[in-house]
Amino acid sequence: MSEPIGLFGGTFDPVHYGHLRTAFELWQTLRLAQVRFLPTANPPHREATLAPAELRLQMVRAAVAGQSGFVVDDREMRRSGISYSVDTLLDLRGEYPDRSLCLLLGMDAFLGLPNWHRWQQIFELAHVVVAHRPGWKAPITGPLGEVMVDRGTGSVRDLHQSRAGRVYVQAVTQLEISSTDLRQLIYSGRDLRYLVPDAVRELIVTTGCYAQHQPEAQR
């Protein structure tokens, strides 16, 4: 079996170094063939995005340009309706029937997994890799506790030797950056330099994509 493909979804509103460092460390540590960034068009579990879909896609492409192993996949942007992860995984499984696929999640997203659309089917389609965040602990009770008992593994080899079905938790360097906080910095007139790649910062400045959404109280 070829090396696994990592799947990293999100609104990326905007993409920042916290996203990129997590993806980079998982790519290296898990020996992934690639990390495929999948910007979400219409997220089912979050408020509406602020930057337009095409601009968020452009920012992700700018952020990963030149990085070996990083690929941008726009299939969720091209699909109409709500972006459900299980539908994306079904698409990818059709393209890679025998390849190991690894859905890369933060611990907070993993803890919300039982609220996802057809969430149990995800394990039939991919492994789930959880990037450990300080202060969070893997669940030991409830549906996710059962998942950890039945599917949890501490071996990267398991991710390479089967195409789906395992849960692997990996500690990564957590940069305390959030897209929400970055937007607040923009609203307060602060510069995003050193928090996002320069190419992303330039797109944000030249398009004014977030300034137009500034709350009335901060104008």
Image: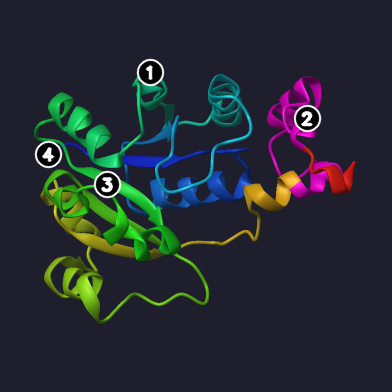
Q: Can residue 189 be seen?
A: no
Q: Which residue is mark 1?
A: 78
* Disc 1 to disc 4, C-alpha distance: 30 Å
Q: Secondary structure at mark 3?
A: strand
Q: Earlier in the sequence, mark 1 or mark 3?
A: 1
Q: Position of residue 127 (x, y in %)?
A: 21, 51
Q: Secondary structure at mark 2?
A: helix
Q: Earlier in the sequence, mark 3 or mark 4?
A: 4
Placement of the C terminus among the 4 image quadrants: top right
Relative vertical location of residue 151 with respect to residue 12 in this rendering, above or below: below
Q: Which mark is residue 212?
A: 2
Q: Which residue is mark 3?
A: 102
Q: Earlier in the sequence, mark 4 or mark 2?
A: 4
Q: Which mark is residue 1?
A: 4
Q: Earlier in the sequence, mark 1 or mark 4?
A: 4
Q: Secondary structure at mark 4?
A: loop
